[in-house]
Amino acid sequence: MKVWCLAILVLLPLSLFQISYGNAYEEKQILLKALKIKGDIQRGALIYEEACVACHYENAVGDPAGTFPQLAGQHENVIIKQMAEIAGGFRVNLTMLPYSTTKALVSSTEDLFKHPLTSTQVLADIAAYLASLPISINTTKGPGKILDKGKKLFESRCSKCHGVNGKGKAVASIPALAGQNYNYLMRQIDVYNKGSRKKANPVMLRLMKGLKKVELGPVMDYLSRMK
């Protein structure tokens, strides 16, 4: 999709996309069916190059500024569920929305394959490809100060869900955070603290409550350096 198209789409209100692409709940349920489909890694690589690489970069390492996260090594069900949430309007992300709907996913493959794919298959293929990639440690890091404090806070508040290695839990759809872009992680603190993450995970909200950005910074720095 051309850059100018993205610019126009991002400016349009969320409600217009929901009107254009049908019932939000149905959008979500359709894409969640991808959880039961086996994804094709090779096909997913082609789709990624066509529809995702411009923002998430080669090998899905994300952009240095932290606008777009590293997706390499992320669990398949995490990718699928996040896309379904965005497409259904349950997670507000106007940048990703134009690429997340069932119609957009199908359109992204029209010129790639002889036989058209369903939106659920496209999503399953992308997720399979991303999960197959190694997590890169060549992402933006923080200042590298008081990492010991960041480690302690991570182990006491975060490791129970995200694992001591920061790799998350696929079965529970808990995302991997190890090696994630520091700038992206810091942006997410603002998202949670400002309450702009629609239907945010209540566990995350409770754990982050009372913690200031200056306290969480070392945690995000520590995570960005995990292998």
Image: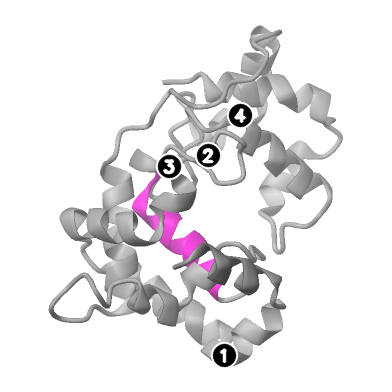
Label 2, label 1: how far apart the Cα atoms are: 30 Å
**Front-lying residue, 70 or 11:** 11
Does label 4 or label 2 sit earlier along the sequence? 2
Q: Nearer the viewer, mark 4 or mark 2?
A: 2
- The residue pinned by badge 1 equals 20
Residue 162 at what x, y percent from top left? 52, 35
- The residue pinned by badge 2 equals 63
Magenta segment range?
74-87
Label 4, label 2: how far apart the Cα atoms are: 11 Å
- Residue shown at the point (33%, 74%) measured from the top left: 120
The quarter of the rendered structure image containing the C terminus is top left
Residue 107 at what x, y percent from top left? 36, 78
Label 4, label 1: how far apart the Cα atoms are: 36 Å
**Is 23 one of the magenta-colored residues?**
no
**Is 81 one of the magenta-colored residues?**
yes
Q: Nearer the viewer, mark 2 or mark 1?
A: 2
Majority SS type along the magenta span: helix
Residue 57 at what x, y percent from top left? 42, 43
- The residue pinned by badge 4 equals 182
Does label 3 or label 4 sit earlier along the sequence? 3
Does label 3 or label 1 sit earlier along the sequence? 1
Name the image quarter holding residue 110: bottom left
- The residue pinned by badge 3 equals 169
